[in-house]
Amino acid sequence: MWRRILAVIRKEFIQMRRDRLTMATMLGIPLIQLTLFGYAINTDVKHIPMGVVDYSRTEASRQLIASFTQSHYFDLMLVADSPRALTDGIDRGNIKVGLVIDPNYEKDIRLRRPARIQVLVDASDPQVATSTLANAQGIGQARSVELLLQNLRPGTEYGVNGMPVDVQVRAWFNPDLVSANYIVPGLIGIILTMTMMMITSMAIVRERETGTMEQLVTTPVRPIELMVGKIVPYVVVGYIQVTVALLVGVILFRVPIRGSLPLLYLLCLLQIVSYLGLGLLVSTIARSQQQAMQMSFLMFLPTMLLSGFMFPREGMPVLAQKLGLLLPLTYFLQILRGIILKGVGMDYLFRYIWPMLLLLCAIYALALFRFGKRD
Amino acid sequence: MKYAVDVKDLTRRFGDFVAVDKVSFQIAAGSIFGFLGPNGAGKSTVIRMLLGILPVSDGEGTVLGRDIRTQADAIRSQVGYMAQKFSLYEDLTVWENLQFFAGIFLVKDPGRLEHLLELLRLKDYRKTLAVALPGGIRQRLAFAVALVHDPEIVFLDEPTGAVDPALRRYFWEIIVDLSQSGKTVMVTTHYMDEVERCDQICFIYGGRLIAQGSPSELKREHVSGHIYQFEPTARLEALHALARLPDVRNPFPAGSAVRFQSEASLADLQPRVQSYLKTPLAQVRPTLEDVFISLVGAKK
Amino acid sequence: MIVQVRELAYRYGEAEALRGLSFEVPEGQVFGLVGPDGAGKTTLLKLIAGILPVQTGELLVLGENVGQTQVLVRQAIGYIPQRFSLYRDLTVEENVEFTARLYPLKPDFARRQQELLEMVDLARFRKRLADQLSGGMKQKLALLCALIHEPSLLLMDEPTTGVDPVSRREFWTLVFELQRTGLTVVASTPYMDEAEQFDRVALIHQGKFVRMGTTGEIRASLPGHVLEVECDKPFQARGVLQGYEVELFGDRIHVFMEKPSPEEVVERLKTGGIRTTRAELVPYSIEDVFLRVTA
């Protein structure tokens, strides 16, 4: 059994070596994706157009405005004389954030009472809303003021009107590259999902298309041997991708890896093998490489949304949340963010590991069942 | 073990379509078995069932004494297969292809691959990618792969399709050598001259077995009357004229000549075809081509 | 002249596919290219069809240079590639109609379609998916589609490879019927026996014509004689006839000899324990010539 598996592995490696383009793509994906995503998302949250109504008109209020504009997160585009004018500006799209400074601002600060400012946010763009909230709070705290956040779009979750400053916010406020820290771990998960699923399904369907599968099934090689032989080389590819992605994250975006690196590598195996298995499943259904590609995409898009990569799962309808629980990536994202950003260990991660193991077994049981049928 | 292959009432259905319908035959160990029939008659389906790649719908069979329905794994380790379409890895070299299949079949003898390179005259191509091989050399590689584990039985599905006449003859020398060393060969081909070298032949048509026997038995049983041949002055006219004669069957071109079957005597036919003759009308010995044509002609 | 070729050569990178071919095909002739896989047949046909660009040499089709994408010339060509290249998921009729629409539609299209369908005996299968046709029927459909725009030159790349002997014969008979309507045909085949029916044949080997002419001319192109022997143990005859050039043809053998001396051969066979039932001097077959000139 092992010799046959080794024969398959050897062959896969030789074929990989010959197929330079695919290999370059496999390594290029983490490099390019991370760079693009990282930078694109950073520029998104900077230079948000802002409008101001300064009822205070004091030295203190001018300092507050300056601290907003000097942060690069906000550009002062409109100085208005009423909150009404600010909401008009937001409606027209001229500004995305409005700042209203209370007439008693300076007095409150002087008397060491909580000073009051009001922030109006265009919540139709959640990215802007989230980072504005964080930035405004951060800047506000530096000035020890109380923020009143007002939402201008219904149905969003930033309804914190009149809430005093929440000190917890500071924990996820990162004055430099807030999104890179958040996005890099997520992207590692996404890249592994996409490429692993596609690479196995295509490799197997290609064998069927070129007729080599016909020759293989006439040999004593067993389905499980073929599966293992096909998967092992791609696990290696998966680990190379993880390494490239981490290197880019650390070198280019200075993402700190707070947790254990060996643990991270170990748990990546769960993700890699799960999605290689899903690729095997795709290959039992798809009849051509083109179909395999399309099916992988079909599965990929909902995965991206439901796993919590793009938007927090907490904000999703219950059904979507439940569906997300069926995706290995959902747990893997938690593991990645847990290890990289929070530095947590096994004891905390265990609640994400066992569902991944369960899903893994289910995927392989199904794949082996489908794969074993020779026709 | 008397028979290398023994199948009884082998049947395969795809939905309503019966691809193979109650086919029974035996192949004696160490013999060459020719498996013939038009494209789509069910030849490849039978071979695929014997290899256990395709489940049997009905009937039973053994290969090397093992049940094709339950012991396919054991069968596969002792059977070599050369597919009709080239089905090796194009992005591997000749040597890598051989080595891969040697690994799969757990071939231990390191000299085996060298021997095959020698036998199929592939030494100069050892490091050539399969994709870059000309057609004939690809077929040589496919043949070598089928023999990599020194199998007891070799299934060759149209091994000589599109190879040059000299190589066709060389392949058959190898086939005959295999049989003389005790191996069993099951082969399909469209070249009727090759079939003369088979010990036993099976004709399959529309999924059914319509004739079997040795070449001489088949010629005796399935060619009624005599075979005549002549070089025509105008081929199409001669064929049309022959088709109109009631006691002439299956007129067809054979090379530059025209050939047909008839119960009538040479003297009787001579005056009736006189005007089309460029060379004298001659009675000739039947070939397997005549057998095939009368079998398929009768079915059509 | 429908096709005129002078010193045509073609290379794929380093590999020489064709090495200086010259020939002509007059109107109404069936010209056969005979040779094994990889000899250069496909390359030559693709050049004539204008699918590959001419690298060196001259190639004229209907007096025009096909290389320079002369639309009118292309419309005069029907081409059947080696691999079945019609739509497997369309019916017979849909395939024909689709192909017809690629060319300027003639007013009598419907009549021509019907005629051709009947001629190739596919009228019954109009509504059948191409994928569900037998090998022989697929080739007939390909023929139909190649002829629907009434080309004057038909190019076919191994149309009968893998088709059974009966269907092969039906196919060529159909082609010869079409030849009577004035069609010129250039076709390739690996089957030597088919080649003998063509008006002219070129034996192609490693990118060169090793022989070209009518079947008669090719037969006469080699010196010496062929003795065809029918005997009771043909497969052992070769061993017995050491020193002779012997090839097996089915259940008979061909012995090549410079002087015709059948008695000598029969005697040798007899001492080797082989009984001869017939020994006759026959003309070279195309296959004999091919075997000898490529040896």
Image (cartoon, coloured by chain):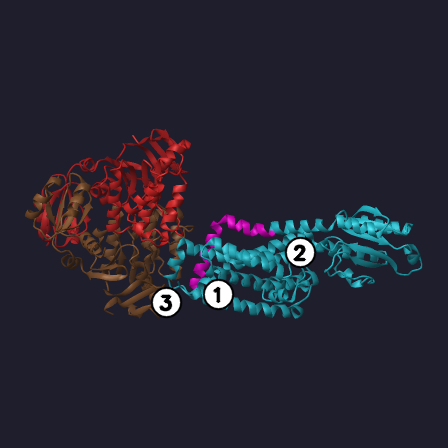
Q: Amino acid at mark 1?
A: Ala
Query: x and y percent of residue A210 in the render?
Result: 41, 53
How far apart, in angstroms, are the residues tagged by discs 3 and 1?
Answer: 20 Å
Q: Residues within 10 Å of mark 1 (few under 14, many from 20)?
A: many
Q: Name the residue nearer the viewer: C141 or B82.
A: C141
User: Is residue B236 left or right of A313 when viewed as pictured?
Assistant: left
Q: Residues within 10 Å of mark 3 (few under 14, many from 20)?
A: many
Q: Amino acid at mark 2?
A: Ile
| Chain appearing in red on the rendered image | C
**Residues at circles 2 and 3 in contact by the CB criterion of under 8 Å:** no
How far apart, in angstroms, are the residues tagged by discs 1 and 2?
Answer: 32 Å
Q: Name the residue nearer the viewer: A30 or C86.
A: C86
Query: x and y percent of residue C264 in the render?
Result: 8, 45
Q: Which range of residues does the magenta coloring cover?
A: A1-30
Disc 1 secondary structure class: helix
Query: x and y percent of residue A373 in the render?
Result: 42, 65
| Residue A361 drawn in magenta | no
Q: Which residue is denoted by mark 2 in the rendering?
A: A183
How far apart, in angstroms, are the residues tagged by discs 2 and 3?
Answer: 49 Å
| Chain appearing in brown on the rendered image | B
Query: x and y percent of residue A72 in the render?
Result: 77, 48
The verdict on a common chain for dots 1 and 2 is yes
Query: Which label belongs to residue B73?
Result: 3
